[in-house]
Image (cartoon, rainbow, N blue to C red):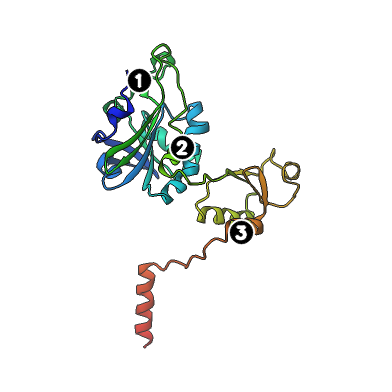
Amino acid sequence: MLPSAASLQGKPVPRVNFKTRAGGQSRDISTDELFKGKTVVVFALPGAYTPTCSSAHLPRYNELAQVMRRHGVDDIVCISVNDAFVMDEWRRGQEAQHITMIPDGNGEFTAGMGMLVDKRAHGLGQRSWRYSMLVRDGIVDTMFIEAYDEHDPEGDPFEVSDADTMLRHIAPDAKAPEPVVMFSKPGCPYCARAKAILKARGIAFTDISQDNKITTSVLRAVSGGTTWPQVFEGGRLIGGAEEVAAHFGPAPVLQPEVRPDAQADAASAGAHGA
């Protein structure tokens, strides 16, 4: 029997250390590091690479992450009873750059939340039930727990722990962004410019790159154009790099970074010149 949302709200999250991995490096992260002094959205799911988790749960949180941050959220955390290597590879495969992936490899956090469920019938062992929560300074503020049917213990409902429900709770008047898709070509400078604009604006997008199936003929059939890139938002054609800049706003001009050692070299050269 799972706990109710009301029984968990107002209580601290379990104190555990997570074995994580990112950028080829392993690192321990404590719950204090994740939650102390922060407002954090957490969504937990049964497993990396599983259908609903990969097609809907994780991608939509990644799409809405920047909107949530603009409304006072410091971080968006995905927790699953998987190991660190699996979670890191899944993050990269999903291009979920706006999400902090936390592997609860031993299920300690999930068990502490009362959300560890038996999925042995599917060969998955002990996994997390699907839920989401808003955590403020380590205290559970709000919980959204998927309904558990004791007559269907192997069910996996997905009705209330989704990103749109969480965003409506955090900011009822916030406008969720439309999905953005870009058809791009490797080595194309205009494609690189359009990507830079979208990234600078914090806009999550799906990049469909030219290959032996995504050809100019496909591009023309979809967009009516033959030049790369072609960008769509919510089913509407935006166009190429110029149209992307006009629609979303140009990317900010970044000043070149000067390394401290380069500054020292310049100062030394000036002294010698004097």
Disc 3 to disc 2, C-alpha distance: 28 Å
Q: Quadrant of the C terminus?
A: bottom left
Q: Secondary structure at mark 2?
A: helix
Q: Quadrant of the N terminus?
A: top left
**Residue 147 seen anywhere in this rendered image of the structure:** yes
Q: Looking at the image, is 250 positioned above or below residue 76?
A: below
Q: Say few, some or many: other residues with alpha carbon within 10 Å of mark 3 (under 14 / 14 to 19 / 20 or more).
A: some
At a point 52% along the width and 53% down the height, the residue shown is: 199
Give x and y (percent) for residue 10: 26, 35
**Label 1 or label 2, whichever comes before in sequence order:** 1
Disc 1 to disc 2, C-alpha distance: 22 Å
Q: Determine whether label 3 and label 2 are within 8 Å by CB.
A: no
Give the camera-side residue of 196 and 145. 145
What residue would you read off at disc 2? Answer: 163
As drawn, the residue found furthest toward the front would be: 173
At a point 41% along the width and 13% down the height, the residue shown is: 121
Disc 1 to disc 3, C-alpha distance: 48 Å
Q: Given this view, does label 1 or label 2 mark the residue nearer the observer?
A: 2
What residue would you read off at disc 1? Answer: 117
Q: Determine whether label 1 and label 2 are within 8 Å by CB.
A: no
**Label 3 or label 2, whichever comes before in sequence order:** 2
**Residue 93 seen anywhere in this rendered image of the structure:** no
Q: Amino acid at mark 2?
A: Ala
What residue would you read off at disc 3? Answer: 245
Q: Amino acid at mark 3?
A: Ala
Q: Amino acid at mark 1?
A: Val
